[in-house]
Amino acid sequence: MNHQNVDRTIERDDGRTVGYVDYGTSDGTPVIWCHGGPGSRLEPDAAGAAGVALGLRVIGIDRPGYGLSTPLPGRSIADWVPDALAVADALGIDHFLTAGMSTGSAYTLALAALVPDRVSGVVVGCGMTDMRHPASRAGMPGPSTHGIWEAPDRDTAIKIATETFGADGSKMLAGLADLPASDIATLTAPDALATATLKQAQSFAHGVQGYVDDRLADGHGWYSFDADAIRAPVIIVHGQSDTIVPLDAARHSAAIIPGAELRLFPELGHFSIGGPAIAALAELAHRNPVMSQPHLRDADHSVADVMGNMNRPVFWSGPPSP
């Protein structure tokens, strides 16, 4: 039952390293957290703090090319699922909830589709949808998405991403002024600023490779998994003030994922959706008697109590996209 919060790695059969961090206690309800892009295993640190009080055990995993994880050029969305399962197996976790933020939404849904017997519930926060949907694709911003999707090869895509973000992410906050007030408040909160340098360093530990490979994977759409195979309950939370992922994406995902529930928050944007995401995870844990641990069921803290007492943002995923 000890608090974890320690960086760990595992080695895959192909020689790659996968990095992860385990927030919470070993008897908490496990949540596999799929970070945004750019992002890293460190994205859910504040979510982990809120989750501990709610009985959740949040596990952040670096996708290939981010943080401690070896790049894997040419990967598909579904190619990440074995990495996530290897981490879960290493921790002795059979069943889990999963949450995906922004770019990470596709990876959390791939988990739910490909191993439906292990995923007990899904939360998508301001998530990208199947990019074969014309309206959602058209609504994504500028060179950081379309430029990479349309690049003739990976080397060209890396050049575009480097020019956009800087090899170390130094240009990534250029679009801050265009964000809604809720996002600016989230990104400029004292604790967010205190961890921003470390998170940026992990997001760009391999330059822009992780980000480019994310975009090259999702640019083809969800061809590597079938959303119709998802059996777990899915809650989609989306800020209606999101200037990065259009509302069309949330609506399309809700339409094609069996039984998905869409919850909209008018004042919230892309980076301020964390509170509703954590609340939805706690709700799913309570719904499922298998996932709901005794200390979660008997907790003295309500979701509202925890969110009200948090003095830092619950979610921060990568930069605004120029």
Image (cartoon, rainbow, N blue to C red):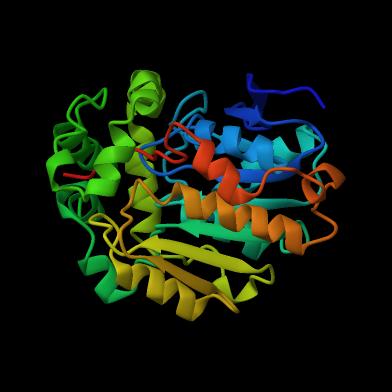
Image coordinates for residue 205, horizontal then vertical, percent: 39, 22
In the image, residue 29 above or below residue 283 = above
The one nearer the camera, 311 or 148, is 311
The one nearer the camera, 27 or 36, is 27
Question: Position of 107 compared to 26: left or right?
Answer: left
Report whether residue 215 is seen.
yes
In the image, residue 196 above or below residue 234 = above
Question: Position of 237 compared to 20: left or right?
Answer: left
The one nearer the camera, 1 or 150, is 1
Question: Position of 221 compared to 16: left or right?
Answer: left
Q: Residue at x 62, y 54 (%)?
A: 281
Q: Residue at x 64, y 30 (%)?
A: 23
Q: Residue at x 63, y 44 (%)?
A: 32
Report whether residue 206 is seen.
no
Q: Where's the N terminus, which quadrant?
A: top right
Q: Where's the C terminus, which quadrant?
A: top left
The quarter holding residue 176 reads top left
Image coordinates for residue 67, horizontal then vertical, percent: 46, 25
Image coordinates for residue 140, horizontal then vertical, percent: 23, 60
In the image, residue 65 above or below residue 252 = above
The quarter holding residue 225 reads bottom right
